[in-house]
Amino acid sequence: MKYTVQIVGVGGQGVLMASMVLGNAAMEMGFQVAMSEVHGMAQRGGSVLSTLRFGDEVISPLEAVGNADMIMGFEPSETCRNIQLANRDSVILMNMDPVLPSMVAAGFEEYPDVSDLVDSVRAVNGHLVTIDATSLAIKAGKAVAANAVMIGAVAALEGFPIPRDVLKDVLGKLVPEKFRELNLKAFDMGYEAARN
């Protein structure tokens, strides 16, 4: 068994933390793990891509285009931008809460309608699960816990090979103690939202 997760978003959304949680959880399960990340202007809200591969005899941290088993899209337009990483059978988890680029925030450009982005993804792949991760994180206590919501949602997706309790335990170990309760609450909220 080999499994590839492509995690996409923008700087500051916790993409790399999510890949660390999933990677460490995969190691807890006894899988071989390889990770790679691309983050250019990540601190300024630029694109971030993290590839996580785990399973038996995983050697390379890179995966061929179209071979992802799952795309975790932390941001709607970034999910669309990276849709070529998926195939018809890939599971796609997409956060519906956009992060507006600076040119959009300044009023020089327009952000696409999120429903149009959802339609674009569904036209390529019918295995799309949408979640309002940032909104749920705010309900849990802070928007920065959106990555914990996304990790919780992954635990609820059919066929994901790492159980909920392992993911939640690893998340609790990796986040700073003062944010542990917040992140575990956000995780549970993401799990319930994706399950329903």
Image: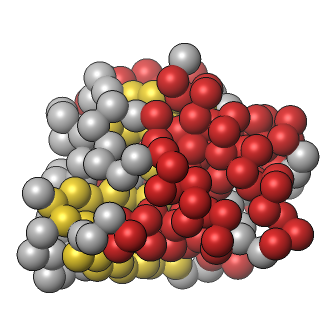
Give the residue drawn at x 82%, y 53%.
182
Closer to the camera in the image, 89 or 24: 24
Structure colour scheme: secondary structure
Query: In this image, 107 relative to 76: left or right?
Result: right
Q: Does any portion of residue 48 appear in the rendered image? A: no
Q: Does any portion of residue 186 appear in the rendered image? A: yes
Query: In this image, 30 relative to 176: left or right?
Result: left
Give the residue drawn at x 18%, y 52%.
66
Closer to the camera in the image, 132 or 34: 34
Question: The N terminus lies in which quarter of the figure?
Answer: bottom left
Q: Position of residue 19 (x, y in %)?
A: 48, 67
Residue 56 sits in quarter = bottom left
Q: Position of residue 44 (x, y in %)?
A: 72, 74
Give the residue drawn at x 50%, y 73%.
20
Residue 189 sits in quarter = top right
Query: In this image, 32 relative to 129: left or right?
Result: left
